[in-house]
Image (cartoon, rainbow, N blue to C red):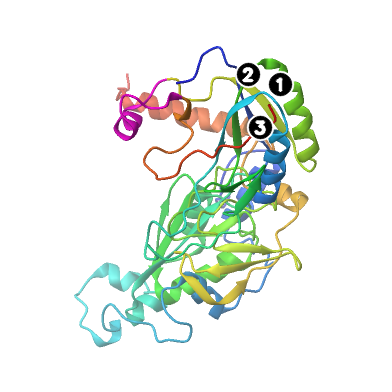
Amino acid sequence: MTDATFPQCRIVTERLLNPETTEHLLNKLSEIAGIRRMVLNGPRLPATVTYGPATGMANPHNMRKTIHVGDQEVELQVHVGTVILELESRDVIPTLKTACEQVFTNFTFRIQEGKFMKTEPSLVDYCKYGPDADKSILGLADPSSKSKPTIIQGIK
Amino acid sequence: MAYKPQYCPGQTQVAENRRKQLDPNHKLEKIRDVTDKDVVLVMGHKAPGAAYPSAHPPLSEQQEPACPIRKLVTPTDGAKAGDRVRYIQFTDSMYNAPCQPYQRSWLEAYRFRGIDPGTLSGRQIIECRERDLEKYAKELINTELFDAALTGIRGCTVHGHSLRLDENGMMFDMLQRFVMDKKSGMVKYVKDQVGVPLDSEVKVGKPMDAKWLKTHTTMYHSLVGTGFRDDAEYVEYIQRIHALRVKYGFMPKEA
């Protein structure tokens, strides 16, 4: 569960991001001290077709790639459109803005402050993780999937 | 004075474009040349060149009941031959796509015969006899109603019309049926409309530029094009329809 005292913000871009741009952005963000948690949001890109006559066939998609962030491989499962961040303090936001300005040179973006992550475990979280779940990972990965959050070593 | 249809209200470029598309006497501008074979490939209902499977014997070979309506209405070629009913479905991006679902159904009703359009918020399906469909689909793809990046031919998994475009200016498609060839700038279909990979790619040309789209779109969008509220006449019309419908809901009685 998120401590309510930690500020959250979200980076919203004018365009959905290519994997290369996402990689560039995340590497910039990983150099910033003071980011606690991060969620990449966007429409899902499944590995197989899930509906219609082609159900079960492979679904090759240019936007679903494995990117390299810090010292970790991250397999993108969505076409990234929004990045939600939990910060240690609001002082980090100007640094975030500078990083974004270096990455998003061809289109606009904005950083919104607010509350964007789960604050309480949902029923699905309870079913998946039980009553003693590690509250710091709630909301970071889809509880119904087998994927887990990626831990990227920061610079602190 | 002879009646002259107005088609739709509005004083903006968007309204003017709507009227042009709806008017069956206005010839739609042809901007690409996708062949019959390519249209058949993208729709995926049969192999190109294969005979049309039939749902019933040709009308000339079967006894028709005595029906005054049948005498009045000339059957389309597909109906005459007894073709199956098949479909094509389009998704239009909100970012200044040249056409949009409601407009599609409306203009098809003016321009085509023997069709069954289905209108949804982000997609529009048209069903009709197979050989008629191929003719109509070709017109829908080859003319100004279609843009390579902002209009998608999608039989299922259509999500994308209300999403932001990607960095290449393409509408989101979970199945990525069409991709941009960065070298040539051409958009090509690599899967048919339901997501089955094609044996050969179908090129549908280059996406139109932002200026062309803004002057040819039939969709109001306050951020990237013409805002709906900028069109006072259209707002007045919609408010009038809305008010009349609400009042009719209460079954008003004339005094």
Residue at mark 2 to residue at mark 3: CA–CA distance: 13 Å
The chain identifier of the residue carrying mark 3 reads A
**Residue A3 x, y percent position in the rendering:** 50, 15
Residue B216, position as x, y percentages in the image: 69, 51
State the CA–CA distance, disc 1 to disc 2.
Answer: 8 Å
Amino acid type, label 2: Glu
Residue B127 lies, with reference to residue A147, above or below; the image says below
Q: Sequence order check: which comes first, mark 3 or mark 1? A: 1
Badge 2 vs badge 3, beta-carbon distance below 8 Å: no
The residue at which mark 1 appears reads as A92
Q: What residue appears at the point 71 percent right and 51 percent down from the top-left corner?
A: B213
Q: Amino acid at mark 3?
A: Gly
Q: Which residue is mark 2?
A: A88
- Identity of the residue drawn at 52% across and 44% down: A43
Q: Give the camera-side residue of A95 and B12.
A: A95
Instruction: Determine whether the residue tagged by mark 3 lies in a helix, strand or loop.
Output: loop
- Range of magenta residues: A120-135
Residue B109 visible? yes
Say what amino acid the circle numbered 1 marks. Val
**Residue B117 within the magenta-colored segment of the rendering:** no
The mark closer to the camera, 2 or 3, is: 3
Residues A137 and B10: in front is A137
Q: Is residue B28 visible?
A: no
Q: Nearer the viewer, residue B206 or B182?
A: B182
Task: Name the residue that disc number 3 marks.
Answer: A154
Quadrant of image for the N terminus of chain A: top left
Q: Residues within 10 Å of mark 1 (few under 14, many from 20)?
A: some
Disc 3 from disc 1: Cα separation: 14 Å
User: Along the line of sight, which residue is nearer the eye, A4 or B206?
Assistant: A4
Residue in the picture at 71% in, 22% down: A93
